[in-house]
Image (tube, rainbow, N blue to C red):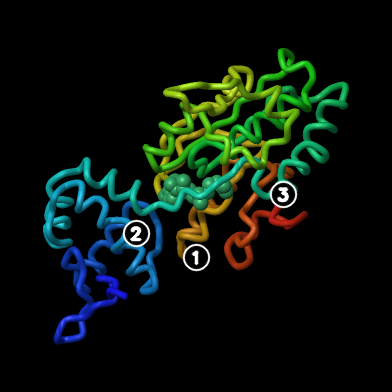
Amino acid sequence: MSPNIATLRDATGNRLREFAFHDEDFHELRALVKSLTGINLGEQKRELVYSRLARRLRALQLRSFAEYRELLGRDARELTELCNAITTNLTAFFREPHHFQYLRDQWLIPLAAARSGTRRLRIWSAACSSGEEAYSIAMTVAETLTDPAHWDVRILATDLDSEMLARARLGIYAPERLHGVSPPRLQRFFIEHREGGVVSQRIAPEVAALVAFKQLNLVRALPMKGPLDAVFCRNVVIYFDKDTQRDLFARIARLQRPGDLLFLGHSESLFRVSESYALIGKSIYRRV
Ligand SMILES: C[S@@+](CC[C@H](N)C(=O)[O-])C[C@H]1O[C@@H](n2cnc3c(N)ncnc32)[C@H](O)[C@@H]1O
C-alpha cells in the first residue's frame, strides 16, 4: 500500500504536505480568523485549517501558506473567501425538532388563540447557514397561523458566510437534504424544481415571503432595533470562546423583552455566560 502524503515526514520530522504550512502560518491565520469571525481555532484545529484552506491555495495556484497570508494582507476579497472556507455550515430542516414543537405548542398556538394581543411576530435565525433553520421556522408559522393575512410576521435570517446566504436565498434543496421534512410539509411548502435532468425541491413563495436573508457578523454591532420575540442562535457559539459568547448574549438580551424566547444548539448553554435568561426546556430559554 502506498503511504498517504499527509502522513509522510521529512528528515526533521515535519509532515510532507502539498503546501508548506508552518507554525507561524497557523498562528497568524487563527488570530486573523478570531478577529474577523470570533471563531476560536484551538491547537487541535490545525489540520482542519490546512485542509479547508488548501482548496483556496489550489484555486489561486499558490505554493505555500506564506504566499496565502501575503495575499490576505493585500486583497480584502480573499478575507471573505477565508471566512467562507473556515465556517462550518452543517444544518438541516427541523434540526432539533423539539424547538419547533415548542415554538408551535407553547408560543404560536396560545398567541393565535388569544382574542386580543399582538399580531406582530419578529423572529431571528442568527446563524442561518443555507437557510434550512429559517425556512423550518417559516413553515411552523405558516401551518400554525391559519389566517396569515392578519399577522405581521417577519423572520430575519443572517449569517456571515456569503456563499451560504446565496444558497439560502435560492431556496433549492437536493432530495438528500430534505430528510427532516415530512411528506405533508413537502407537498404543501415545496415545488418540484428540474434543472439539467436533476430533480430538487424549491421553497414555495408562501414560505419564502416570510424570510429576509441578510449578511451579519455576530461579533460586530447588531443593527436591528428589536424587540425580537424569538431568537434561534443555534450551533454557532460553540465556535466562540466564553468572553465572545458573553458579549454576544448581552447584546442579544438588549433586543428582547422579559418572556421572549431564545433557542440554543444541543451542546450549547448559557451557564456562566448570561444571567439574562432562564432555562425552560432542552436548550430553550426565556428572557427574565
Ligand atoms: C453549524 S452552522 C449552524 C446552522 C443552524 N443555526 C443550525 O443550527 O442548523 C453555523 C453557522 O454559523 C455561521 N457563523 C460562524 N461565525 C459567525 C459569525 N461571527 N457571525 C455570523 N455567523 C457566523 C457559519 O457561517 C455557519 O453557517
Compared across the picture, whether 230 is left or right of 67 comes to: right
Q: Amino acid at mark 3?
A: Arg
Identify the image quadrant of residue 148: top right
User: Which of the two residues, 268 or 171, is positioned nearer the viewer here?
Assistant: 171
For disc 3, the marked residue is 286
Q: Which of labels 2 and 1 is toward the front?
A: 2
User: Which of the two residues, 25 or 54, is positioned nearer the viewer here?
Assistant: 54
Decide: is 181 above or below 202.
Answer: below
Determine crowd level at label 3: few under 14, some 14-19, many 20+ residues with C-alpha closer than 10 A. Answer: many
For the N terminus, the quadrant is bottom left
User: Which of the two residues, 94 or 123, is positioned nearer the viewer here?
Assistant: 94
Q: Residue at x 40, y 43 (%)?
A: 160
Name the mark on residue 242: 1
Q: Earlier in the sequence, mark 2 or mark 1?
A: 2
Q: Residue at x 55, y 53 (%)?
A: 235
Q: CA distance from mark 2 to mark 1?
A: 13 Å
Q: Earlier in the sequence, mark 2 or mark 3?
A: 2
Determine crowd level at label 1: few under 14, some 14-19, many 20+ residues with C-alpha closer than 10 A. Answer: some
Q: CA distance from mark 1 to mark 3?
A: 20 Å
Determine crowd level at label 2: few under 14, some 14-19, many 20+ residues with C-alpha closer than 10 A. Answer: some
For disc 2, the marked residue is 34
Q: CA distance from mark 2 to mark 3?
A: 29 Å
Q: Residue at x 74, y 44 (%)?
A: 259
Q: Residue at x 29, y 71 (%)?
A: 4
Dot 1 beta carbon under 8 Å from ligand 1: no
Q: Amino acid at mark 1?
A: Lys
Q: Amino acid at mark 2?
A: Lys
Residue lying farthest to the bottom in this orientation: 12
User: Which of the two residues, 243 or 188, is positioned nearer the viewer here?
Assistant: 188
